[in-house]
Image: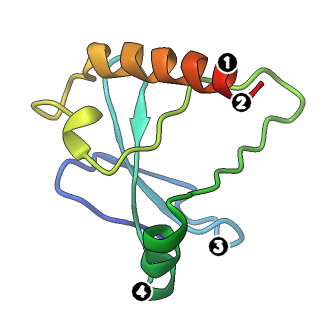
Amino acid sequence: MKPIKFKEQNCTYAENQPEYGNLPSYKDSDGVVTSCWELSLTERLRVLFTGKIWMGLWSGDRPLTPSLLTTKKSELIVNTDKIVSKNVKLFYKLLRKNTKDSH
């Protein structure tokens, strides 16, 4: 999987830091950062057959910030300057449901 440039991109994190690689991103006025990732053919097939995507976040032993994985840009970027708050609420609702279901 690799981060890719996209139309709404307005910043690049880790630019000129080759040890990390560039992270093309869209940062809105609330500080919410969105990036787009492209899957290789092998990764697409793996997702197709397993239905799973794993996510790793480096927290530095600090609390994690809310995160959302999606396949639909419209769940994150609307008119290139607003986050769809209903989808963030839906994310938390689904997270709570999945947490209850897994126990």
Picture coordinates of residue 83 (x, y %)? 27, 23
Picture coordinates of residue 92 (x, y %)? 50, 17
- Asked which secondary structure carries label 1, the reply is helix
Q: CA distance from mark 4 to mark 3?
A: 25 Å
Q: CA distance from mark 2 to mark 3?
A: 39 Å
Residue 22: tell me if it is visible: yes
Answer with mark 2 or mark 3, whichever residue precedes in sequence.
3
> Looking at numbered disc 4 in the image, what kind of residue is underneath it?
Leu
Q: Which residue is mark 1?
A: 100
Q: Which residue is mark 2?
A: 102
Q: Which residue is mark 3?
A: 18
- Quarter holding residue 61: top right
Judged by depth in the image, the label closer to the viewer, 4 or 2, is 2
> Looking at numbered disc 3 in the image, what kind of residue is underneath it?
Pro
Answer with mark 4 or mark 1, whichever residue precedes in sequence.
4
- Quarter holding residue 81: top left
- Asked which secondary structure carries label 3, the reply is loop
Residue at x 42% of width, y 86% of height: 41
Judged by depth in the image, the label closer to the viewer, 2 or 3, is 2
Judged by depth in the image, the label closer to the viewer, 4 or 1, is 1
Circles 2 and 1, Cβ within 8 Å, touching? The answer is yes
Q: CA distance from mark 4 to mark 2?
A: 30 Å
Q: Which residue is mark 4?
A: 41
Picture coordinates of residue 38 (x, y %)? 39, 70
